[in-house]
Amino acid sequence: MNNITLHLEDVSYSYNEAGKERQILNKINYSFEEGKFYSIVGPSGSGKTTLLSVISGLDQPKQGTIKYKDKKINKIGLTNFRSKYVGIVFQSYNLLSYMNAHQNVKTAIEICGVKSSTTITNLLSKVGINEVDSKRNILKLSGGQQQRVAIARALAKESNLLIADEPTGNLDSSTAQDIINIFKKLAHEENKCVIVVTHSKQLADESDVVLTLNDGNLVI
Amino acid sequence: MNFIKRALLSMKVRYFRSILILMTFIVILNLILSGLAIQHATEDSAVSARKKLGADVTLEFDMQSAMKSTSTEGKGGFGRIERTPLLVKDAEKLTKLNTVKSYNFETSTFASASSFTEIRQADVESDSNTSDANKGQGRMMGGADPEAIDVTLSGVRELNLLVDFTSETSKLTDGRLLTVDDVNTNNVVIEKNLAIENNLEVGDTIEIASIDDADNKLSIKIVGIYETSTILDENMPIRFGAANPYNKIYVPYTLTALVITNEEETDASNIINKAVYTLDDPLNIDKFKEEAKKLDIDWTKFKLDANDTAFETMVGPINQVANFSNKTVVIVTVAGALIMSLLLFLIIRERTQEFGILLSLGEKRYKIISQILIELVLLFVIALGISTLTSQKMAQTIGNQLLVNEVQNSSVEENGFIGGMRGMGFGGQGRNQVNPIEADPIDAINVSISQEEWKQVSGIGLLIILISTIMPATLIVRFNPRKILTRNV
Ligand SMILES: Nc1ncnc2c1ncn2[C@@H]1O[C@H](COP(=O)(O)OP(=O)(O)O)[C@@H](O)[C@H]1O
Ligand SMILES: [Mg+2]
């Protein structure tokens, strides 16, 4: 049996809209394991982004606990959790625009504070960014290249947990396939727990576990 | 990349934005610094005007206010003004004030030469009209025979403090000057020409007499001989001997009373024309005046004058500029602070996304705020450096222009006004009206900003940056990164 990386216990989330509580996540219980590539699917507005935000420490659940390797992430501290234990990839890349690829990755490493066992150049080449491109301003790279940089940045902290919200949403299908392959490799060869929210059937099909979010519940 | 390197990189890469912020800072700082520099320069000018005019304050009968009250009471002409005598004991009250370094009492009267002959202009220039003129003048001098008004007795407490000697129009050539020790003695100092003409030397004793009563004689002893550089106006005929500067005899202030035989002023030995107080510092003049006003002296009758008219003339235009610059500094500072705050607010709002990204990477909030602070403070420091240099030039140009305008505006009114005053000022009988300092309006300022003010501007500027950065930035980063990144902030 694989090690449990992330454990959700009765995780609920609701928005307060005009005085009315709107339940988005409803007592979700689930355990994510190392070495697996998860995809989360579900209709638009079903709460996928909300779920990812909560498990990546970008937001707090209204109820319930999230544990990273048996430790409550609240105890770890959300800022600390984000800096050291979770790599996050966004649909819109969210790279720092005044930096090149190299500097973006370097920033994440310095914030994490843990010495990387591999070089930034290695990290970038792993996701297919060559040395020349790594020195160009981030905005001069294509969407696919930017997303690769974002993944390299997420890998920089050498955490076990990689969380991505529609990472291929803005990419053409062949580029998307490259990204999917990277995720697969990370899960299977580097024993990472990869959780990806997607609309893409292509991506979901290639994942190890497909979870569907429906009416606030996560079902296989 | 740590936050310091990020700050530098951000400034470098987004250089266009950096330059825009820099320019805004420079413009605001230039305005504030120039305003302050002009303000400072005007203060300096007022101070140097004070210094130039010296630390002397004169206590004397207030002729102007007497004239004013006489005319408002409807009693009519100047002739009716009665000089309230200034008593020595009143004048001595002010000497106790701790700003007074030294002081002098001055009196003045005329006397007849008994045992010697005064220097007569008639000796030089014989003119038949002169005697007619003498007669006319004599009538004005209160009925005394003009032929009897031979010499002027200038009474002092300390002769070296008298403006004649401080301005070096008179210089000692033999013997010594009169000091405090000569008070109540008959020691005198006479002019060289008078001495030569009469074969007099230090140590000799001569006789003078009252102009009203030739029998009222007084022996005086020559302790010093001086030489005056005052030259008689040759166009003005000498009507009586006392008007000739050679016939001026310096005496202790107590002596002048001895030759006055006016029944009304029986205790004339206690009366002086004026007291001149030399302060330790010209800048203490206002303080001295303030303290003096608390003393028991009839300030409706007497006035303290520190060359005030001259001072006003000199600093009038400067004060106008100061007035303007003070207002400008306030307006510009407030407007500058507002503009800066607004600019900083916009800059920080614009960087919301960046904050969200850094937060999502697990960056600490204080480091995010520190990064933006470093950027803005650095730009501010550069702007401050540039502004310190440019504002100097700007302030000098603006300041000079403002001052030139003011001097031109004021010269018309001021001249007319002072001319009138001066004419009236000569009303005092036998007074030494000495005005050795010409009072031209100050028409150039030396613009510079004091370290104190520079520190203030830097301090306030930094404070604005700190507040205007930390406040909105904190407002943003206190939200969770998800909210920030989805722009729900
Ligand atoms: N800040 C918010 N305030 C109120 N409702 C929100 C907010 N963010 C998202 N929602 C709502 O929550 C639901 C789930 O949103 P989200 O998690 O983004 O869905 P998904 O990613 O599956 O499309 C949506 O119906 C959305 O309208
Ligand atoms: Mg979504």
Image (tube, rainbow, N blue to C red):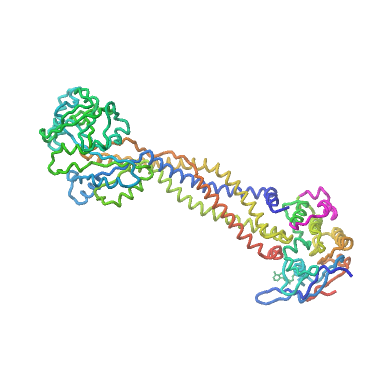
Residue A47: quadrant of the picture: bottom right
Residue A143: quadrant of the picture: bottom right
Seen in the picture, residue B10 relative to A37 is either above or below; the reply is above
Which x, y percent locates residue B308?
33, 43
- Left or right: B58, with A158 as reference point: left
Seen in the picture, residue A52 relative to B106 is either above or below; the reply is below
Foreground pick, B323 / A27? A27
Magenta residues (range): A111-136
Foreground pick, A125 / A112? A112
Which x, y percent locates residue A156?
80, 57
Foreground pick, B336 / A104? A104
Foreground pick, A179 / B212? B212
Residue A83: quadrant of the picture: bottom right
Where is the C terminus of chain B found, in terms of image quarters? Answer: bottom right
For the point 87% across and 69% down, the residue is A209
Asked if one can make out residue A199 in the rendered structure from this viewpoint, the answer is: yes
Asked if one can make out residue B417 in the rendered structure from this viewpoint, the answer is: no
| Number of disc labels | 0
Which x, y percent locates residue B478?
66, 64
For residue A135: magenta?
yes
For residue A82: magenta?
no
Which x, y percent locates residue A12?
74, 75
- Left or right: B251, with B306 as reference point: left
For the point 80% across and 64% down, the residue is A163
- Left or right: A69, with B261 as reference point: right
- Left or right: B403, with A118 as reference point: left
